[in-house]
Amino acid sequence: MRFPEVLTRTWWAGALLVAMAAGAPAKARGAQGVHVALLPAQQTVDPGAEFDLSMEVTVSGSAFNGFDAYIGYDPAALTLIPLSPISLQEGSYFASACPNRFHRFRQGTDRDTITDVLLCSGVSLTGPGQIYKLHFRASSTPQVTRVRFLPGLQFYNAGLFVNPDSSKDAYIGIGMQVGVGEPGRPLESSLRATPNPSRAGVALSVGASRGGIQRLTIMDLQGRIVRHLQSGLFEAGNRTAFWDCRNDSGTALPAGVYLATLETAGQIIVTRFVVLK
């Protein structure tokens, strides 16, 4: 089930008018933005087990008093279990800031829509702290899956947009370990981007320890897949894939930080690189 953005904007109309009338300070649009992540970033759970994910502002940044978030996941791997009452899903940091809140949660088949607004006069937050939480049940099939922020994540302060600097997804290993590439951390498979930074294109050196189904994608810092490079059955060994800094439609993408993600043999490996113009 997909809920058009216009529905969320309609929910916001009344809430934002109340927040603005209450005199929440209009100091939004801070250059720092909001850094938000789904935590823990990696965890391993048993098949069929239940577990929690926390949506947290990880560092102090620009002030905000409300947000829209769209959370996506694979329904074949994960089932979201709403808490009762639904207000228990509001994060401790967010809920404790103000007893008066506009909170709306809509569950879909593969995504959930969250809207939460503080309605107390002059109250806004800068982080860090927990702003939401979700409870899932894992499937019985061993695999590595991801819970991610979908396009549309937006923070507000007294009705003004506060643009997030970054959002980070969570990876769940169901009955298997999760490996996300980090400097100095040994992995069976490897992924490297050169040159970094780059102006014309990026060569992605893939080292796969075992053959099998593999997927190589490019994401922006909001976790949105902008290019599907490779997907299918590959043999073990080394290969190189080239990305021309364009999306799936062939449109040139702007300068910025991008993430190459390799899913292979029960692992997810992420490498970060910079595109210059």
Image: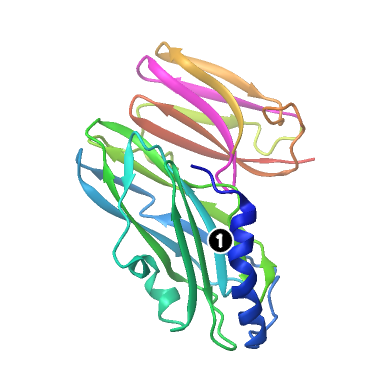
Residue 218 in sight from this viewpoint: yes
Would you say 94 lies left or right of 32 here?
left
Specify the quadrant of the image occupied by residue 166.
Answer: bottom right
Of residues 151 and 179, the one nearer the viewer is 151
Q: Which residues are magenta?
A: 200-224
Most distant residue in the top direction? 235
Quarter placement of the C terminus: top right
Question: Which residue occupies the foreground of this view, 199 or 75?
Answer: 75
Q: What kind of secondary structure does the magenta stretch mostly adopt?
A: strand
| Residue shown at 64% from the left, 61% from the top | 9
For residue 73, side relative to residue 4 (left or right): left
Q: What residue is shown at x 40% (from left), y 18% (from top)?
A: 213
Up-down: is 120 above or below 86?
Answer: below
Q: Position of residue 121 (x, y in %)?
A: 58, 89
Is residue 37 depicted above or below 31 in this figure?
Answer: above
Q: Residue at x 30, y 31 (%)?
A: 143
When asked about the image quadrant of residue 161, the answer is bottom right
- Tag 1: residue type? Asp
Tally of numbered discs: 1
- Among the 4 quarters of the image, the one containing residue 275: top right
> Could one spot residue 57 in this view of the protein?
no
- The picture places residue 211, in percent across and down from the top left corner, at 37, 14
Check disc 1 and report the residue beneath it.
68
| Magenta stretch encompasses residue 206 | yes
